[in-house]
Amino acid sequence: MKKKPPYLPALAAVMGAVAGLRSMTAPAAIAWAAKRKAIRLGSSPLVEIISAKLSDQAIRLALAELVADKLPFRRDRIEPGPLATRIVSGAACGAVLSGAADRPLAEGAILGGLGALMGAFGSYHVRRRLSREMPELTVALVEDALAIAAAAAIVAYASESL
């Protein structure tokens, strides 16, 4: 029998960083995986927020965010409102992943929230720097691809370990 890889608390932090890049990509990835029964979410109260039942809505919101991010009037992710949304999203996703691994929800929430904070500020500064050297749309699309790929990798690993 193939040995399952261990759950790593870093999964919560990295999924939080994904939320720092794109606030709805992280919950959409978890909800999508839960809907396909790739991961079991457990019984945390947060499961109702990020659940298989809400998978389609979460995916629609994530797609809308990907489009809205390219609009010229978008707010910077490090402004209070967008930053708070990213931190809450990262904390919720981190808690759900920790709960699915029978780990403390608070541990996952803290790691996810901190990951979102670092992801938001780090990606903000990288995007500003790269946008000086290449078109803004190109940078935004690369950022989208990075967020989606990271979320997919986390979900794939989690499906093996949870």
Image (cartoon, grey):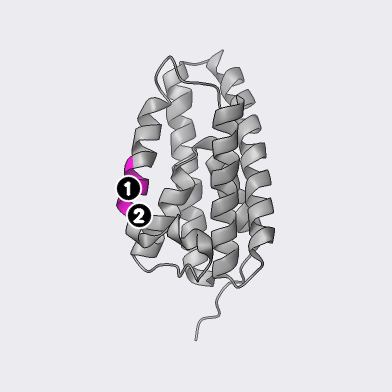
Locate residue 24: give its quadrant: top left
Check residue 121 for magenta coloring. no
Q: x, y (%) of residue 23?
A: 50, 39
* Residue at the (55%, 76%) spot, across then down: 4
Q: x, y (%) of residue 150?
A: 51, 48
| Element carrying mark 2 | helix
Q: Are marks 2 and 1 in contact (CB under 8 Å)?
A: yes
Q: Please say whether residue 90 is visible from this viewpoint.
A: yes
Locate residue 81: give its quadrant: top right
- Measure how far apart labels 2 and 1 are at the Cα level: 5 Å
Report the magenta residues as a range. Answer: 54-60
Pointer 1 residue: 57
* Residue at the (46%, 15%) spot, across then down: 135
* Residue at the (46%, 20%) spot, across then down: 74
Q: Please say whether residue 78 is visible from this viewpoint.
A: no
Pointer 2 residue: 54
Q: Amino acid at mark 2?
A: Leu
| Element carrying mark 1 | helix
